[in-house]
Amino acid sequence: MTLSLFVLLISAWWRYCTSKTHAVKFTIDDKSMQRNLRKLNKESPQMLQKAFEKMSITLLGWMNDGSPNSPKKPPIRWAVLRASSSVLVDGRVVGFSEVRPEKGEATPATTGTIRRRKFYYVAELVWNTPYAARMHNGIYKLGPKSSEDPGSGPGWIPAHLIADRNDFMSGLAEEVKDSLNKL
């Protein structure tokens, strides 16, 4: 509703005319406004979906590599845990980690369990290894590579959900704004 009102105000053409009595009149170019509103109503769900997918992939990168707001990242031995991460939105894969393991094989998730709800989007960030939960919760001995990699260790998920939430929302707004400018 707010977005439609915003677009309505932006797309409306105002013409001001002053008469001899100095009254001000205005008219709205209804055709242009209606055309833009129809276009927005048709394309806004897809724009928001694409923006959400892109920012969810960005969030996965921040979680795997650290971000300007938090250096936390998963522990590392051969990078299989980081390489086995993926992003799923509405139960379908939209992105994978760009990390490649030094040894072993990556096993990113290829199907999700959560579907879109009526009024919000849901992203699943998955580290698809049998030991991911133990690593996240700190039930392991830190290896030599993790000790050398600042920020690696347990608790990387909540650290980034808290530290990067504003950047995530700002990025989402920028993506939607860019999409609106292309209409």
Image (cartoon, rainbow, N blue to C red):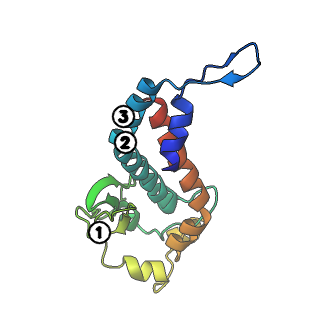
Q: Quadrant of the C terminus?
A: top left
C-alpha gap between disc 2 and disc 1: 25 Å
What amino acid type should be assigned to the residue bearing mark 1? Ile
What amino acid type should be assigned to the residue bearing mark 3? Lys
Q: Which mark is residue 41?
A: 2
C-alpha gap between disc 2 and disc 3: 6 Å
Callout 3 touching callout 1 (CB < 8 Å): no
Mark 3 or 1, which is nearer the eye?
3
Residue 9 drawn above or below residue 126: above
Of residue 149 and residue 173, the one placed in the foreground of this image is 173
Instruction: Give how far across and how far down residue 68 sits, in percent.
Output: 63, 55
Q: Can see residue 41?
A: yes
The mark that comes first in sequence, 2 or 1, is: 2
Q: Residue placed farthest to the top in the image?
A: 20
Picture residue at 39% right of the left edge, 62% below the top:
119
The mark that comes first in sequence, 3 or 1, is: 3
